[in-house]
Image: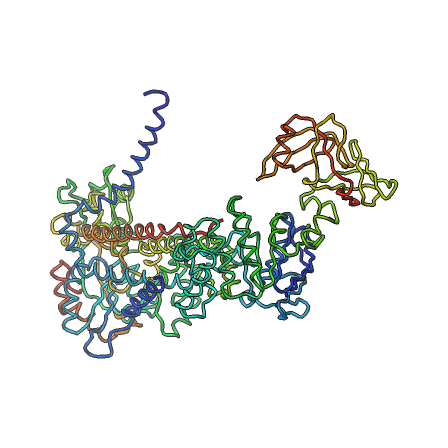
Amino acid sequence: MTGRAWFPVLLGVCLAVALTFLTLPVVAIFVDSSPGELISSLGEEGALDALWLSLRCTAASIAIILLVGTPAAYLLATRSFRGKALVVTLIELPLVLPPAVAGIALLAAVGPEGILGGAIDAAGIQLSFATAGVVVALTFVSSPFYVRQAMAAFAAVDRSLLDASRTLGASEARGFLRVMIPVAVPGLAAGTALALGRALGEFGATLMFAGSFQGITQTVPLAIYDRFSTDFDAALALSAVLVAVSAAILLAVKLVRGGEALGVAPR
Amino acid sequence: MVVGVLLACAAMTAGCGDGDDSGGDSSDSPTRLVVSAASSMTKALEKCAPEFGDAENADVKLSFAGSDELAAQIRQGAPVDVYAAANTRLPDELNADGSLEKPVEFATNELVLAVPEQSEIDSIDDLTKEGTTVVIGSESVPIGAYTRETLAKLPPAQEEAILRNVRSNEPDVNGIVGKLTQGAADAGFVYVTDVNATNGELRAIELPSDLEPQVTYGAGVVTKAKQPDLAQQFVDGLTHGDCADALGAAGFGPAP
Amino acid sequence: MLRVEARHQLGDLVLDVELVVEHGSCLALAGPSGAGKTSLLRIAAGLLRPEQGHVAANGETWLDTHRGIDVPAEQRRCGYVFQHYALFPHLTAWQNVAYALHGLPRSERRARAGELLERFGLAARADARPHTLSGGERQRVAVARALARSPEVLLLDEPLSALDARTRAAAARELGEVLRESAAPTLLVTHDFAEAAQLGDRVGIIDQGRVVQEGTPTELAAAPRSAFVADFTGAVVLTGLARPGPAGVTYVDLDGGGNVTSTDAAHGIVAVSVYPWEIVIEPAGEEAHGSADNRLPVEVLSVTTVGSRVRVGLGGVQPLVAEVTRASAERLRLEPGVRVIATWKAAATRLVGL
């Protein structure tokens, strides 16, 4: 090999290794068992329960995150106040909590023996080991993913656009809805995708806080774990579904990002 | 567009409730019954629970895990109606702190040494050989407790040698069975019913009768159960009913 | 009528301004960057609250820090044109223009926006998004948008600075027409005196947060009150020591050598200013002809053609710039290195005490 040529070859080899390492396990999910077996395992009641539960709980969780997180992120991106750095760190905390610890934390906070346990019980609500609890766990671990991205997206919007909106007679609320959000959409979409992916794959906190009760709290990741020692094909089938859904989410985000040309105002 | 997506999400959650409702008020919709049972009963209960459900117009939701984990959940206030464990100690403990009504003994089981079908291992002595990988249950789960109880009855040198070969402490019997069927370990201690459930993939090696522990299963109605009467019926069914038959067919022994 | 008074700490600078813009007229504030010009506009618009201030437009008080009145920006009827236009990238041209008209039904908004775009010659681009428009087109959309709801006051932040030189001339003419037609008092800020002179009925020179001189463009150029104003309005500025001479004339010994005469009265350290177009270049070595009183030997450093004029950079004890016709430049065979004489009248020489 000539003196110069080794470097590009090395780059190519590294890429090939990385690509193989990352794609082989994913491909193996689809190839290890026949499509027929995979599809029939999916039809089994427990699997359907898990899929439907994951879908509902993730949707609810994302809805809450978007409704509450978007205005919160906007506030953090556009205002400064004393203690702001602390607030931001607190919001990002779940990011660094191991999922199992998050589960314990939730039990300690809103479990029946937890700090707010009495009040929640008195209100007749069951969170731990219940479907609502799955939503709580998913929301807890996924919201920082969205809020962080949303904050960055809002902060990147040219401030003069908001000023312009105000000089044109729109209240701050109107400006938020008609200017800030549309312009920040690519960043918000990316944040939503991250939160969505995290929520779909959430395992540890859900297991600890909500348990693994089929049809009630056994989401797809929990169902995969449940089946993996006893019915590997069923575990494969559910995994294949999760892979397909995650890929679809990634694709959707790429498409929305295509609108990036309109994203940030010209300097 | 965004508003539409949000509304769709909200609709999906609202439309299907959060699954907490304890069955319908109308007598048409089945009543939900939540049963937490030790993993070793998986195949048997999965067969008989729907039958029970049809007979009593109930929707039985089964949850299987190590008996210790299930007990912890009940202590944490998990909305469970029936608790069935692989020992009597855990139900008694729950009864003592008021989480469980007086439990009954409903079945017995046998601890065996399980090996892959083709294995050359044929006695507990073979486990002392260097390089043999052994899988047992963790300390707090019944299967693990029984195993340690058994090993403690061996001469100390033998016990030590076997424990040195333990590669994993699994949270329940499914984990042990899984490791054996996937070829990740040479031998493990499970119940004879678990070996039966593998349909020939694993072979059971009986333990000498002086080593064999007394394995008794206990079950009871959770005090905070939403369906205490239905729960009691289910527990009764474990001793004489469809589930008792299913347990027997799986290899469980009758109540002592 | 627009009245703006403000006192506000801006970093190291203290903004201290009081100005009045009459109905139908345009006051152009010209000054170097960092002088506080944009902040003043933001105060008028309600986007910045000064420590002390008073803003009133057409009889309505918008801000009175003393009495605790602060009408929010969205309720002041200002038309604001931002330096980089701040067009909403996700809306089309007509949607941008119609943004302020949110009370009206869609068809009316479209119609009104269409009218304005038509006036600016952009009817064909009504459905285009800002990123597909040229710089000049975007500037016109920004102005149209500011005018959409017939504002009480117009505020323009460097309206031409983002345009390239070629587009700027046409845009300046057009903007001048729009401002003349508009009855709203207009406050415009820029760093370019020529732009201020072209667009403003009156010009204020702002430096370090204060307005140092205000008047018509001609007044400012003819009688700059300080070296800064003279320099800013484009004069050549030399420094020297002045002493009175006979018959009302003042002699100035220039720093570094040479001297000039002026009809202004002054003594002590002075700044001497003269406008480039008042300097006549004569070939070196010839006898003085013409009635110019001041003569300085210089060397040509640079020759730049700007339109039909030629700007000649001259180096002597102090640098000078002269503006001559193309014909003169050719006749004199001006090119770098040539030695010439820079001459100008004593009457065109302004003196300002330093």
Q: Position of residue A172 (x, y in %)?
A: 50, 64
Q: Is residue C279 above or below residue C95?
A: above
Q: Residue at x 31, y 31 (%)?
A: A13
Q: How is the image coloured?
A: rainbow
Q: Quadrant of residue C89?
A: bottom left
Report the residue that reaches farthest toward the top: A2
Q: Position of residue A213 (x, y in %)?
A: 27, 62
Q: Residue at x 36, y 64 (%)?
A: B3
Does residue C51 appear in this view?
yes
Front residue of A4 and A124: A4
Front residue of C140 and A16: C140
Report the residue that reaches farthest toward the bottom: B26
Q: Position of residue B127 (x, y in %)?
A: 22, 42
Q: Position of residue C323 (x, y in %)?
A: 65, 38
Does residue A141 appear in this view?
no
Report the quarter where the C terminus of chain C lies. Answer: top right
Q: Quadrant of residue C58?
A: bottom right
Front residue of C210 and C242: C242
Report the quarter where the N terminus of chain C lies. Answer: bottom right
